[in-house]
Image: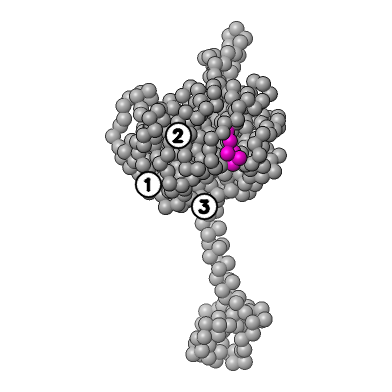
């Protein structure tokens, strides 16, 4: 007989735990047999005994530990891969356009009194706007982490915000049924309030050279507004339930929307016609975005499609769409025919936000599983998982700005956030917002 790894006392407790399990399950024959063979003829089931239910507790503990070990092994493999890549990459390419966020965050911004709903970067200066369910927005300097001001005007949760392309205006929308325009050059004064939606306004974005705004609402509609007058000039209908967002393509010709009706749609912004109906998710779609042209080559490879036309200017701006849903999946679509090219699985909870990396090779996603994941667009594989917040990660935004270096004459000219100096340095920065009421800034 082989020697036992258990002491006599541990062995007795194990026997009693097994006997208690057999008794609770009603396995009387096995119970009687084990009593005799284990020398426990005097055993009586007692719900107050320390071994009562012990076998089930130990079993579930082992399963939890196995999952933790597997998660740690996966994380360890990812870290080893990152270390290997950082050692082999030339020093001149580190912290370059291929940079992806890694812990710890550079800054954790606190001050809101409710969950964060949106974060938006100023296109020129180092300002970040955060919107919250506390009915306010806050302006921060993301480089220093300093708080600058609070914007008050909405009376209910602020759902979305965005700067125009020059950073002169900020648009926001709220559950109070309104959109508001703020003049950034005049101490963020509220210059217009747009009325027309019949329910909470979910998203608001600029389009058509900042002359118009597109908004989406729980009233099932999408509205297009004229910035100069504040008038609603077009209403698009088609979704059967709450429209979570409506975002423009990069030149503003197309819109992509998503809804509680589990569909996403591509619209012609000028005519209001539906060009593609994207269906396949099994729950509410929280986010839908167009892929930038720089990502199209990788997405064609991902979907097994032939190469597209050469030159970014020739790429169709509605070529590809990414959607994230409460079914925990991300889907990549052909935005012209509505075909689902790939489903990305990895998150353990609702997908809340998506952002394409400026290098066109990676998609970042935020989720209620408290993580940000990075996906290789050529393979569809999750290449990195970042434990980003202590609670649900509700929003994500990638800002890429140009930090001007001194020109030969000592001047550093900036035009719409892009430096005209030949030795300008591009800065990558990522912001995430959470139900934990914090914003985190991730820098190289």
Mark 2 vs mark 1, foreground winner is 2
**Residue at horizontal 51 percent and vertical 40 percent from the top:** 217
Secondary structure at badge 1 equals strand
- Which mark is first along the chain, 3 or 2? 2
Is residue 90 one of those drawn in magenta? no
Q: Quadrant of residue 128?
A: top right
Work out whether residue 289 can be spotted. no
Check disc 3 and report the residue beneath it. 349
Label 2 sits on residue: 235
Q: Which residues are magenta?
A: 174-179
* Closest to the observer, 240 or 401: 240
The alpha-carbon separation of the residues under discs 3 and 1 comes to 20 Å
Residue 266: percent from left, percent from top: 39, 36
Q: Earlier in the sequence, mark 2 or mark 1?
A: 2
Looking at the picture, how far across and down is residue 351, in whole percent? 50, 47
**On the image, numbered disc 1 is attached to which residue?**
279
Residue at point 64%, 20% (across, down): 185
């Amino acid at each position: 007989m082989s020697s036992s790894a258990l002491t006599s006392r541990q062995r007795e407790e194990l026997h009693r735990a097994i006997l208690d399990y057999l008794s609770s399950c009603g396995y009387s024959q096995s119970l009687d047999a084990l009593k005799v063979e284990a020398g426990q003829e005097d055993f009586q089931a007692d719900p107050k005994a320390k071994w009562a239910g012990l076998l089930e507790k130990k079993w579930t503990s082992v399963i939890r530990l196995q999952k933790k070990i597997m998660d740690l092994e996966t994380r360890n493999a990812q870290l080893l891969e990152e270390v290997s890549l950082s050692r082999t990459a030339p020093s001149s390419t580190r912290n370059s356009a291929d940079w992806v966020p890694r812990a710890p965050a550079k800054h954790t911004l606190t001050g809101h009194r409710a969950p964060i709903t949106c974060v938006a970067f100023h296109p020129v200066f180092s300002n970040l706007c955060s919107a919250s369910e506390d009915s306010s927005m806050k302006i921060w300097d993301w480089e220093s982490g300093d708080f600058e001001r609070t914007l008050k005007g909405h009376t209910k949760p602020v759902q979305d915000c965005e700067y125009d392309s020059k950073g002169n205006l900020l648009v926001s929308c709220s559950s109070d049924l309104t959109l508001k325009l703020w003049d950034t050059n005049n101490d963020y004064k509220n210059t217009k309030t747009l009325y027309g939606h019949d329910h909470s306004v979910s998203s608001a974005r600029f389009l058509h050279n900042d002359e118009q705004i597109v908004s989406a609402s729980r009233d099932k509609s999408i509205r297009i507004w004229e910035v100069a007058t504040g008038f609603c000039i077009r209403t698009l209908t088609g979704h059967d339930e709450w429209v979570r967002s409506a975002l423009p393509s990069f030149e503003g010709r197309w819109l992509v929307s998503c809804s509680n009706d589990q569909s996403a749609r591509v619209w012609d912004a000028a005519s209001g016609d539906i060009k593609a109906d994207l269906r396949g998710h099994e729950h509410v779609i929280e986010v839908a975005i167009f892929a930038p042209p720089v990502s199209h080559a990788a997405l064609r490879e991902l979907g097994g499609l032939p190469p597209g036309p050469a030159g970014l200017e020739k790429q169709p701006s509605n070529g590809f769409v990414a959607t994230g849903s409460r079914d925990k999946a991300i889907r990549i679509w052909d935005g012209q025919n509505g075909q689902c090219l790939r489903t990305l699985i990895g998150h353990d909870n609702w997908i809340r936000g998506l952002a394409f990396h400026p290098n066109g090779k990676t998609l970042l996603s935020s989720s209620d599983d408290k993580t940000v994941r990075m996906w290789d667009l050529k393979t569809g594989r999750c290449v990195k998982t970042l434990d980003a917040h202590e609670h649900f990660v509700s929003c994500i935004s990638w800002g890429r700005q140009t930090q001007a270096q001194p020109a030969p004459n000592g001047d550093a000219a900036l035009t719409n956030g892009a430096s005209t100096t030949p030795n300008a340095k591009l800065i990558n920065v990522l912001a995430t917002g959470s139900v934990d009421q914090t914003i985190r800034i991730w820098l190289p």
